[in-house]
Image (cartoon, rainbow, N blue to C red):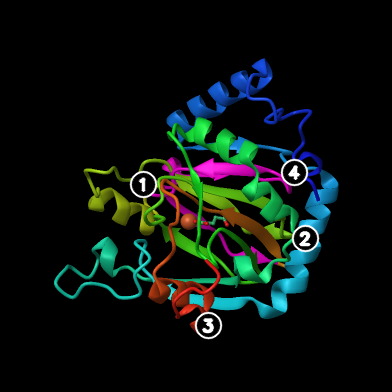
Amino acid sequence: MLPEDIVNLENYPIIDSNNPTRARLIETLKADLTAHQYCSLPGFIRPAALERAVIEAKDARPRAHDNNARRNCYLHRQGDPDLAPDHPRNLLFDSSTRMIAYDLLPDGSPLKALYHWDCTRLMVSDIVGADELFDSADPYQPVNVLCAEHGDQSAWHFDSSNAFTMTLMLQAPEAGGEFEIVPAARSDTDENYDYVRKVLTGEHRDDTVTVTREPGSLCIFCGCNSLHRVTPVKGSTMRIMAVFVYEAEPGVIGDPKVNANIYGARADQPSLSA
Ligand SMILES: O=C(O)CCC(=O)C(=O)O
Ligand SMILES: [Fe+2]
């Protein structure tokens, strides 16, 4: 599938970097990202591409890694015995997702075509204000599809390392599976532990924003300093979400130990295909 047939270019004319509609769009999305720590691009991909991506995810589902973990909001599976029991580092919650790694998606996947398209990468770097972005060189990480079934959830967490996270909703569940964010719960210079603890224990519900997501909608958010979670999925329809990782440098590959936690033991080896 060609990228031009995947992206809804009528609403998002990203193919032409001189297009004034594109320029206006980027300005609005940039301002949203600054003000709210997330921005949304509803109807970003066309129905046929969406349909195909859903079929591919369902086909790959039996080979997904069941990533079930009890972790704190810093994505660590252990607390710190030197800290108080109610310190955020010692508050561990269950998370579970069915993780489809990049290598389990077909080469011709619309998700891969979208990710590797120069126009997508340029649009994203313009929105997030990066000088330049690069595709991940990791065999597992560049594009993932996360399936969440009845009872699956992702507890409050900060994403590690990347300044922003990009997700594309492919299929909504019958109920639950809401994406919630507490914008700028910490900063690069202040862990804001007291506030973070209160979010984790449910004392700051008023600061929580629920980001409405329709299938086909793209979201870019600052997951590194904004706490976020996915509430428990309910019902027999899977929540299916694609996640894309761009890097600030070329040639970035993941740590095999970290990859093994996310993608299963098969990822705990030096990469061959990167
Ligand atoms: O599934 C989602 O909506 C968010 C996933 C997420 O937290 C992440 O990819 O970091
Ligand atoms: Fe996250």
Q: Residue at x 50, y 28 (%)?
A: 30
Task: Residue 224 in the image: state x and y as whole percent.
Answer: 39, 49
The residue tagged 3 is 266
- Assess disc 1: are there few (<14), some (14-19) or many (≥20) residues with their C-alpha within 10 Å of its C-alpha: many
Residue type indicated by callout 4: Pro
Relative placement, left or right, of 274 versus 205 is right
Q: Residue furthest right?
A: 48
Q: Tell me the SS state at disc 2.
A: helix
Q: Tell me the SS state at disc 1.
A: loop
How far is mark 4 from mark 3, CA to CA?
A: 31 Å
The reply to whether discs 2 and 4 touch (Cβ–Cβ < 8 Å) is no
Comes first in the chain, label 4 or label 3: 4
Residue 5 visible in the current orientation: yes
Q: Residue furthest top?
A: 20
The residue tagged 4 is 3
Residues drawn in magenta = 205-234
Check the image and report above or below for 114 versus 109.
above
The residue tagged 1 is 225
The residue tagged 2 is 54
Residue 237 visible in the current orientation: no
Comes first in the chain, label 1 or label 3: 1
How far is mark 2 from mark 4, CA to CA?
A: 17 Å
Q: Nearer the viewer, mark 1 or mark 4?
A: 4
Residue type indicated by callout 2: Val
What is the quadrant of residue 254 in the picture?
A: bottom left
Relative placement, left or right, of 198 versus 13 is left
Whether residue 209 appears in magenta in the rendering, the answer is: yes
Q: Nearer the viewer, mark 2 or mark 4?
A: 4
- Assess disc 3: are there few (<14), some (14-19) or many (≥20) residues with their C-alpha within 10 Å of its C-alpha: few
Q: Residue at x 69, y 37 (%)?
A: 42
